[in-house]
């Protein structure tokens, strides 16, 4: 019952903050929710100066919410499936080269650039950390979250091609980043030999296994949906694909996020085209759109509230500010290098690269992965730096990406 009460409070806060944003701030939902949540957290911290017991009580309740488990083992599966179910194969097909390279090569490049930079920066400030732990940070901060910027970019007049690149990359790079993170985490365990074969084996089992599982789940779901015409049951089948499939992936050590993306794509294309009536398609679209909106609202409220439980120091906060710049440079380099290969088949303009760089927001998955790191791996350091980057990313980059995109000379993307 305690969990129910905590979730109830989160829903009430999310609804209240969303209302305030809609009536007063009028910012994009994700950005507005996080901003109001941060202001709320700051007010609690100020109140804590005069009423320490109140602030401590709120912090205790927040600590009872396992943010990492809630997102990685619960919300992420729904959000990735919901995102994938609305993307058409034909759009992905036209941008497949970009999406594949940006969601794989870019993530791996970013992981190593940020990992190396963080390791040497912390060493420069007299803070000793394990190099593999710095790589863990590189992996967790590399995935992008387009939720807060896609609607802004659409109003800024970006092409359908660039919109598909951003949405497709973010869907797959979440899964790839989690796989890279898990692979590096496995290598930190004593007794595990670090060589190219072991790394490829760990990565391949998670990634390839996850995609294959997702394709099988999506196809099985399509066959069941095609055999009936009842939208209530068909919506329930899509829920079963997500919840049952993610649980299965967890137990057989395949990538749940990649499985959900693959299953969502099959359901949203083959399932809609050949298995669903028009009324079922409408209900499934609206159901998953609503699920996505509600979960994102809760997610961004939680990110804002995490300010109350972060343990940090001024030195780490300063390093976090430096890492904002490093992260942006790493994002630029990790997009620019693959774009050289993409240019052999399609036109990737300077404008595209700059928008992908500034629009590459970090979100809840980065904080969830940081919180999943063991305390003995310097978790407080990684959580603080991650939080600084995520806050800057969503609030500053998110609120300026529209003007930034409009200020660049329009080119064909």
Image (cartoon, rainbow, N blue to C red):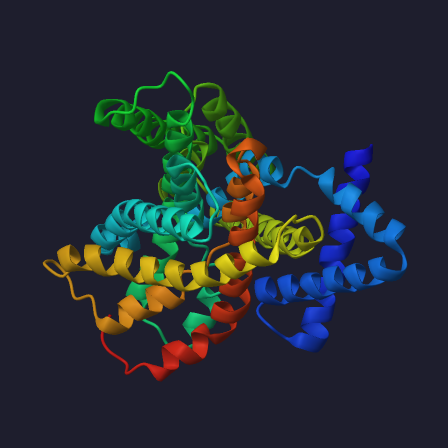
The percent position of residue 42, horizontal first and vertical second, equals: 73, 63
| Residue 1, placed above or below residue 88 | above
Residue at (9% x, 58% y) in the render:
344
In the image, farthest residue toward the front: 126
Residue 81 is left or right of residue 216, and the answer is right
Q: Is residue 298 above or below residue 136?
A: below
Q: Is residue 390 visible?
A: yes
Residue at the limit of the structure toward the top, as seen here: 191
* Quadrant where the image shows the C terminus: bottom left
Q: Is residue 275 left or right of residue 289?
A: left
Q: How many tags in the picture?
A: 0
- Residue 307, quarter of the rendered image: bottom right
Q: Depth check: 380 or 347 in front?
A: 380
- Identified at 73% across, 69% down, the residue is 20
Residue 67 vertical placement versus 167 (above, below): above
Q: Position of residue 71 (x, y in %)?
A: 58, 41
Nearest the viewer among 334 and 388 is: 388
Q: Position of residue 154 (x, y in %)?
A: 42, 71
What residue sits 54% from the left and 58% below the top? 388
Camera-side residue: 274 or 164? 164
The quadrant the N terminus occupies is top right
- Quarter of image, res 192: top left
Q: Quadrant of residue 333?
A: bottom left
Instruction: Give the residue at the far left of this rendering.
Output: 344
Residue 247, given in percent of the width and then of the height, sits at 53, 25
Judge whether residue 271 can be spotted in this image: no
């Amino acid at each position: 019952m305690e969990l129910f009460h905590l979730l109830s409070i989160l829903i009430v806060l999310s609804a209240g903050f969303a209302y305030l944003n809609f009536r007063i701030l009028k910012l994009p939902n994700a950005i507005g929710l996080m901003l109001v949540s941060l202001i709320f957290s700051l007010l609690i911290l100020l109140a804590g100066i005069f009423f320490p017991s109140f602030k401590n009580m709120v912090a205790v309740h927040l600590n009872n919410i396992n943010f990492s488990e809630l997102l990685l083992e619960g919300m992420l599966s729904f959000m990735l499936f919901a995102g994938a179910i609305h993307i058409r194969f034909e759009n992905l097909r036209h941008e497949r080269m970009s999406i594949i390279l940006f969601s794989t090569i870019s993530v791996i490049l970013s992981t190593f650039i940020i990992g190396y930079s963080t390791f040497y920066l912390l060493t420069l400030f007299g803070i000793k950390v394990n190099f593999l732990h710095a790589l863990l940070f590189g992996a967790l901060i590399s995935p992008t979250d387009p939720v807060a910027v896609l609607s802004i970019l659409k109003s800024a007049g970006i092409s359908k091609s660039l919109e598909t690149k951003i949405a497709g990359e973010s869907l797959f790079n979440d899964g790839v980043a989690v796989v890279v993170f898990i692979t590096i985490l496995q290598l930190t365990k004593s007794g595990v030999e670090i060589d190219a074969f072991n790394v490829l084996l760990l990565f391949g089992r998670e990634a390839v296994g996850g995609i294959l599982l997702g394709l099988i789940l999506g196809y099985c779901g399509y066959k069941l949906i095609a055999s009936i015409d009842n939208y209530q049951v068909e919506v329930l089948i899509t829920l079963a694909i997500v919840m049952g499939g993610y649980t299965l992936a967890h137990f057989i050590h395949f990538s749940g996020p990649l499985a959900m993306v693959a299953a969502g794509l099959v359901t949203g294309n083959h399932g809609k085209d050949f298995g669903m009536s028009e009324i079922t398609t409408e209900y499934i679209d609206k159901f998953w759109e609503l699920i996505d909106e509600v979960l994102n609202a809760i997610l961004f409220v939680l990110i804002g509230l995490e300010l109350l439980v972060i343990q940090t120091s001024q030195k780490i906060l300063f390093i976090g500010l430096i890492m904002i710049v490093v992260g942006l440079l790493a994002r630029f380099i990790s997009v620019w290098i693959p774009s050289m290969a993409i240019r052999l088949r399609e036109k990737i303009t300077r404008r595209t690269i700059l928008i992908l760089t500034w629009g590459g927001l970090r979100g809840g998955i980065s904080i969830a992965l940081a919180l999943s790191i063991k305390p003995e791996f310097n978790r407080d350091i990684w959580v603080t730096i991650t939080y600084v980057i995520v806050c800057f990313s969503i609030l500053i980059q998110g609120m300026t990406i529209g003007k930034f995109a409009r200020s660049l000379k329009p080119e064909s993307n």
